[in-house]
Image (cartoon, grey):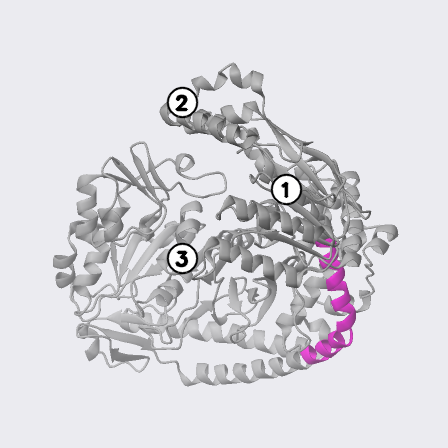
Amino acid sequence: MNILLFADIEKIMAGFRPLSGPGKLESEKIFELYDEKRSKERLEHVKAAFSFLRNKKILSDKIKYHLKRVPILPDCRFSGREEIFIVKKFLNNVKAVHSCMENRERKIFDFHFEMQDLLERLSLDSKSDEFYISDAYNPALAVIRKKIAEMERKEAALKKAFFEKILAESGLDFRKDDFIIVGPEFREKKLESISIEPHDNYSFIVKPVLPRGIIDLLFEKEKAVKEEKEIENAVVSEISSEIEKKYREMKALEKAIARIDIAFAAAQMAAEMGLNPPQLGGGKIECEGAFLPVLKKELAEMKIDYTPLSFSFDRKINVITGSNMGGKTVAIKTIALCQVLAQAGFFVPAKKYKAPFFSSIFCLGEKEQAGLSSFAAEINDLISVLSHSKQPCLIFSDEFARTTDSLQASALLSSLIDFFSSRNVYFFVVTHLSGLAGSSMADFLSMKGFSGSLYKKGAHNNAETQADKIKAINRHMRYELVRSPQKRESGDALAVAEMLGLPKEILSSAVKYLEKYRQKETI
Amino acid sequence: MDFSGINGKNIFIAGFGKNCGKTTFLNFLLSRIEGRRACFSIGVDGEKKDSFSGTAKPAIKLMPGDMFLYNREFSAPVIASKITGSYENGRIIAAEALRPGFAEIHGPSGNQKITEIISDFRLAGADTVIIDGALDRITQAASISKAKLFYVCRPSPDTLKETCLKLKLLTAMSSTGLFKYDSVFSENGEMKNGLEGENFYLPNALTADRAENIPKEARNVVLSDMTKVFLDLKGWERLNLSKKVFFALNIRLEAFIVNLYNVSKAEFESEAGKEVLRRTVYNPYEHTSICGH
């Protein structure tokens, strides 16, 4: 299974919202996880953005306002005024972001704005984000535009007089409309000023026939507009070549904006979700107060306490057992989420999270494959992981081989533990299988499970709906991770089944069978 | 019809069938709007010719100060204009006309941006915004922005019956009651789905199959809006007999713009019925001396 899927990364990333075009584009690549240098750089950027957000609220809002307005640069072939507009809008807003930062901050983001000359050249019309090839770009434009404006005035006056004449002659008003639909009676009207064509079996379309004077004027105007267009095109071509000369520097600015935007979005998410910077390095995975933000929020809405994960994993191989619904999967998903976010250079949902930087991270699990059983799919996945893993490697396994014979599954998992123990692989295994062979490299851990005393009080008896039953289980379950004897058996399955409402007849029979099995095992 | 009531509003123009005259009607409205105007379309218009004037379309007649959207991947506007903004990574350009002239208008490919664009135009000073788009693309924006919707059709002898049935269905649906917005939509704007008590919520399309499978225990059926109904008139009437039907979003149908083609008013009126006629505006470009074809 894809590690991002296992870590439910999509859920938490709903809170990650880059604002600029370049930032949004770059965000598609943030989970390329195995570039340690880039990861460290990004973490420094997020730290800087976090501090900026906390200490400079007004400037932060200003930065966000302008980031939202930074577009993606067009490709290097500039062909028109639209591209110039986009470049102007880009430079205007990048400059505004730049002006919000101090030199120290600009240095962290490698963000240097040296495009003032070009921006001024693009701002002859106005300093706003808008763009228009104004007369300031070429004095010839002012001359031709004046000529066009005069012709327009004349055209309007001529048309007004002409349409009033038609109105007087025929009663048809073309002052607002280019055509009018009329009945057959108009067919008989022989007026030079209008043309009549059939519309359908019942009606005709009438259009004004402009007199020679207006048509000549329109031709004149068209010629003038063409001349204006040619001058404009020359201006566009001139400005475009100036932009092209600066294209590489602009692309560097675009990358800087992406870095800043990603960092501010990550810092904003960290502030909203209570995330903290991780520490990558060293050989041990340690976490304090780690949590899954989305689950924590969901539980809070149900008024259920969330138990964060605090643990120091002394060994690379960790086998986690415990009750059903005891939080085993949540525990390893928490580590997976923290590790993935940390490797992406983000803050993590933990008060403290320390771990090595891994060259590959995987989750073993069923992946539906056509024509294969669940077990065969798992084995295929395992083979693929073994062939693609680069060390140091982090692998999570959530109930590996649960769909096959438990004895053989235990044997397979024991062998896998041995195999990984001799390599630089950190292996987190959640399992219900008992009797795993113990490698000296492996730590056996378990979730604390039911609090016996609380459970016996029978607080769950009042639970009526399924949701209430789940709430009751959650109230009595202790989600702390503890070291445990190697072959500890999880004894809470039947208790959970009872709390969920399994009929007593089946339950009491199951208890009897369990006792028989235990007696056999003892003998 | 007196069109002065459209000043200052968001106007949506939808239509039944190709070449029904939406663009012509848009130009008709533009010439009657006072104050600053803005217009754009939703989605790509496949029609090449205007149904009345026969000119290439969509060519919108603009005046200085008018705001519009165009697609820079298509041809740039002939009209002298100033570029004021962009959407969809610079694909869609917002511009302001500097001289009278014509422009092709385009708009966003998705309907999520519609509300944002309307709001941007308003901020830039537009008094009235006109949106040309298919009915199923405008639902959310039309309902949120309390817009006026004009529905344009062009019944011909071949399409008269079909068009009238469509108009009757729209008329019947426009009198459907509204469910309280907050009790249908979550905070993130997602509509409830499925049976809840005696209410059956259906955010997706209501087809004949789905109508058959509405749970028996549901007394009320809550649909998203009229654009999600894919029943014929009989199917709609049948559903209304067995259940109380509501919409979650309201679209205010202002008028049917009926451009008759080889169909007389008498023929149309006998097919359409009184309720449709109450909302009908015949070919507004018609000289008033034509009476009854």
Residue in the image at 44% along x and 25% along y:
A512
Range shown magenta: A235-263
Q: Is residue A27 magenta?
A: no
Q: Is residue B65 left or right of residue A16?
A: left
Q: Of the residues under marks 1 and 2, which one precedes in the sequence?
A: 1
Q: Amino acid at mark 2?
A: Glu
Please name the residue that numbered disc 2 is placed on.
A464
Spatial CA distance of label 1 from label 3 is 44 Å
Badge 2: chain ID: A
Badge 3: chain ID: B
Indicate the position of residue B56 as horizontal and vertical percent values.
Answer: 40, 77
Q: Amino acid at mark 1?
A: Ile
In the figure, A417 relative to B71: above or below?
A: above
**Residue A8 visible:** no
Label 1 secondary element? helix
Please name the residue that numbered disc 1 is placed on.
A332
The mark closer to the camera, 1 or 2, is 1
Q: Quadrant of the N terminus of chain A?
A: bottom right
Q: Which mark is residue B137?
A: 3
Indicate the position of residue A335 as horizontal and vertical percent values.
Answer: 67, 43
Badge 1: chain ID: A
Residue in the image at 57% along x and 16% along y:
A453
